[in-house]
Image (tube, grey):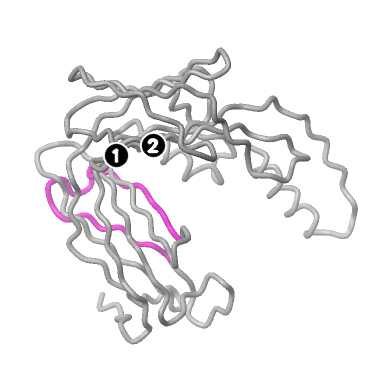
Amino acid sequence: MRRFIYIICVMALVSCEKVIDIDYHDADSRYVVEGSLSATGTEVRVSKTNAMDDNSTGSDVDNAVVVITGDDGTTATIPFIRNGYYRSKFKGIPGTQYQLDVEVDGHHFTSTSTMQRTPRMNEFRLVWKKMLTERYLFGDLRLQDIPNENNWYFMHIYRNGIGYRWAVMKDDKNPNKELQQLFTFFRDGAKDSDVLKDGDKLKIVIRAIDQRAYDFLYSMQNMSNTGTNPIENFTGGCLGYFSAHNQIEYDQDFYYKDVVEDEE
C-alpha cells in the first residue's frame, strides 16, 4: 500500500515543475503472512507493514504461533527460526488440503490451500520477436499440462538470484496439452539495467498451485490496471497469501548466441 502511493507520488513529481502537496492518511499497521508448503518442507514469514514515513520495508514478527493442519489428519507446529521466518521439514502430499493458522498478539489468521501434483516443463527458449518496427527479446516457456484436471501455474524467472519476471496461468485455453507463456524481457538496443548480459544466470521456477493462490496472484498481477489491492487470501484481516504446491526448477546461463529468431 505504501509502495503503491509512493509510485504515484514519484510520477506526479517528475511530470511537472509545480510542487504538489500529497494529502495522505496514515493507515494502521497490518500483519503480513506469506506461507509456502511444498514437497520439501514448510516456510512461513510473518511481518507487519510500516507507516508511510518509515523507510524500512517491514517489521519481522517473532512471537507468532504457526500451525499447519491437513484434511488427512496430519498437523505440525512450525517453529520460529529468525527474522520473521518459521520453517519446518513438514511436507505436503498432493490432493491434501492444508490449513495455515497464525496466532499473534490476540489475532488469528487462517488460509487454506490444496497441494498440487508436480508440473512438467517441455521447453524454455530465448527468442527475438518483431513487434511493429522493433525487435524484442522474449522468454518462451512451454509446459505440459497435468492431464484430466483443472490446473493453475505460477512461473518465476530469477536473474542472478534476484526476481526478474513472473506470471500466472491456467489451463483453460489448451487443457491436457502444451501450454505457452511468453515473458517480455526488453527491446533490442535498450541500455538500462533490465537488459540481460552474457553470463547472467537464469533460474526458472514453475509451481503447480491451486485456484485460491492463482486468484490472489492474478489480482496482484493486475494491481496496476485496477488501482486496487489484491483480493484477501486470509481470514482475520492480514495481508499475504498461502500456497501448497509442487514445483520444479530449471537453470540456464544466458548468452546472446543462444537466442533464436522468431520463425512465425
Please name the amino acid that badge 2 sits on.
Arg
* Residue located 9% across and 39% down the image: 148
Q: Which residues are magenta?
A: 164-184
* Residue located 68% across and 50% down the image: 7
As drawn, the label of residue 110 is none
Quick check: 9 left or right of 239? right
What is the crowding at mark 2: few (fewer than 14 residues within 10 Å), some, or many (at least 20)? many
In this rendered view, identify the residue nearer to me: 178 or 111.
111
Residue linked to disc 2: 87
The quarter of the displayed image where residue 83 is located? top right
Please name the amino acid that badge 1 sits on.
Gly
Quick check: 244 left or right of 72? right
The quadrant of the picture occupied by the N terminus is top right
The quadrant of the picture occupied by the C terminus is bottom left
In reply to whether residue 95 is colored magenta, the answer given is: no
Where residue 255 appears, x then y in whole percent? 36, 82
* Residue located 68% across and 35% down the image: 50
The quarter of the displayed image where residue 29 is located? top right
Instruction: State whether the magenta stretch is mostly helix, strand or loop.
Output: strand
Q: Secondary structure at mark 2?
A: strand
Residue linked to disc 1: 41
What is the crowding at mark 1: few (fewer than 14 residues within 10 Å), some, or many (at least 20)? few
Q: Are marks 1 and 2 in contact (CB under 8 Å)?
A: yes
**Residue found at the very far top of the displayed protein:** 106
Disc 1/disc 2 C-alpha distance (Å): 8 Å
Q: Secondary structure at mark 1?
A: loop
